Amino acid sequence: MSQTPSSVPASRGPADHNVRDQIVEAAGEHFSHYGYEKTTVSDLAKAIGFSKAYIYKFFDSKQAIGEAICAKTLSAIVAAVEEAVAGATTPTEKFRRMFKTLVSTGVSLFFNDRKLYDIAAYSAGEGWPSARAYCERIRQILTEIVREGRESGEFERKTPLDETVHAIDLVMQPYVNPLLLQYNLDVAEEAPAQLSNLVLRSLAP
Amino acid sequence: MSQTPSSVPASRGPADHNVRDQIVEAAGEHFSHYGYEKTTVSDLAKAIGFSKAYIYKFFDSKQAIGEAICAKTLSAIVAAVEEAVAGATTPTEKFRRMFKTLVSTGVSLFFNDRKLYDIAAYSAGEGWPSARAYCERIRQILTEIVREGRESGEFERKTPLDETVHAIDLVMQPYVNPLLLQYNLDVAEEAPAQLSNLVLRSLAP
């Protein structure tokens, strides 16, 4: 019905992807100095040297830029977890590796790239789609591990699968959720092993 | 060796206790409007209508006043937990009640007396003695319950007691620690029952 506004490019080629990446990168830098919450798209445009209208060609809002930064960061954590899990043979070992990798990747992000961490923490606090998708993916990986352990007889089968997965998810949340992890850094080294032991005892047939 | 400074009263009778309580109460009100961190003892003195020197007769520092407010608040939570545990007969039921009461008392404090909650959260973040004593007391109650369950044969005895208690303590922290509880309010209703079930499965002999 409505016509495509003439300001929107007809197609998005590799050049557009470059500009998107450029905006995301520059925005990450800018947020790190002035904070995500205090920065407006006008501030960003000035800092990057693009017009505000030009930025709006690529992102609908400041949150869309934050989302892009956040999704990239959280994808890296998921990739690390998937790799760690793929290297294990038993469900028990998969669970241990998942928990350990989640925490160690999150902690290293916190200490090495604080600006990305802060945006991830903010996104988790605000329930952004990228943060929700991340939690959902972690839950899927956990569900697959528990299901596999039940099928192989390594884990108990009396408790409904949903209930088991949900409770384990609650145990992991303080270390998975970037908003909470920052308060648990002092136990982040030892907690995954100790909590994995407890969870695995609860899963014993 | 050194003489008692003449400004310190020779004894602290009931009148002194009244003044202490008065300062604590007025400080709680003041902190609630201006925040604990932003308030100085001078601000407090002005607001209460006492001289700064007079306040220093009763409290060494602003933190000492905050500690008094915090200790009172956390004692109320401990008292509620002790009462709930005393009303149960089995270690399983004691554990469930402890967890549930800890969370419900914390949540009701958060919603009904936000100013006291904020000081408790701040004290937990800063590792104040009152907050550490509170965590220590909760851990003691937990240890007693687990020990009783091991003695009665209700809980397993293979895992070292310390390890078991420490892991359960980690599971409860996000709901016990006021600094963390405020981020977990959306699951605070269901989490104690679901996590209690998981913990009790891990304790099965």
Image (cartoon, coloured by chain):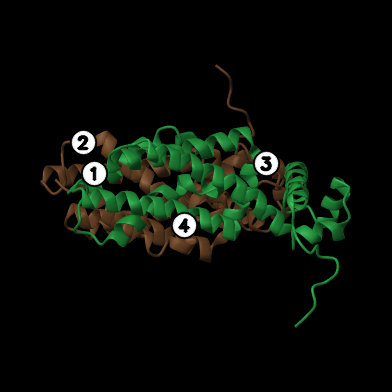
Chain colours: A green, B brown
Circles 2 and 1: CB atoms closer than 8 Å: yes
Q: Which circle's residue, 4 or 1, is located before the other in the chain? A: 4
User: Which is more foreground, mark 4 or mark 1?
Assistant: 4
| Type of amino acid at the residue the image marks with label 4 | Glu
Name the residue that disc number 4 marks: A136
Name the residue that disc number 1 marks: A201
Residue A176 horizontal/vertical position (percent):
47, 47
Circles 4 and 1: CB atoms closer than 8 Å: no
User: Which chain is mark 2 on?
Assistant: B
Of B116 and A58, the residue lying toward us? A58
Residue B205 horizontal/vertical position (percent):
14, 45
User: Which chain is mark 3 on?
Assistant: A
Give the residue drawn at x 27%, y 34%.
B162
Residue A19 horizontal/vertical position (percent):
78, 49
- Counting other residues with Cα less than 10 Å from the Cα at mark 1, is it few (<14), some (14-19), or many (20 or more)? some
Of B134 and B198, the residue lying toward us? B198
Name the residue that disc number 2 marks: B159
Of A122 and B113, the residue lying toward us? A122
Identify whether B135 is placed above or below B76: above
- Counting other residues with Cα less than 10 Å from the Cα at mark 4, is it few (<14), some (14-19), or many (20 or more)? few
| Gap between marks 3 and 1 measured at Cα | 38 Å
Query: Which numbered marker is on residue B179?
Result: none
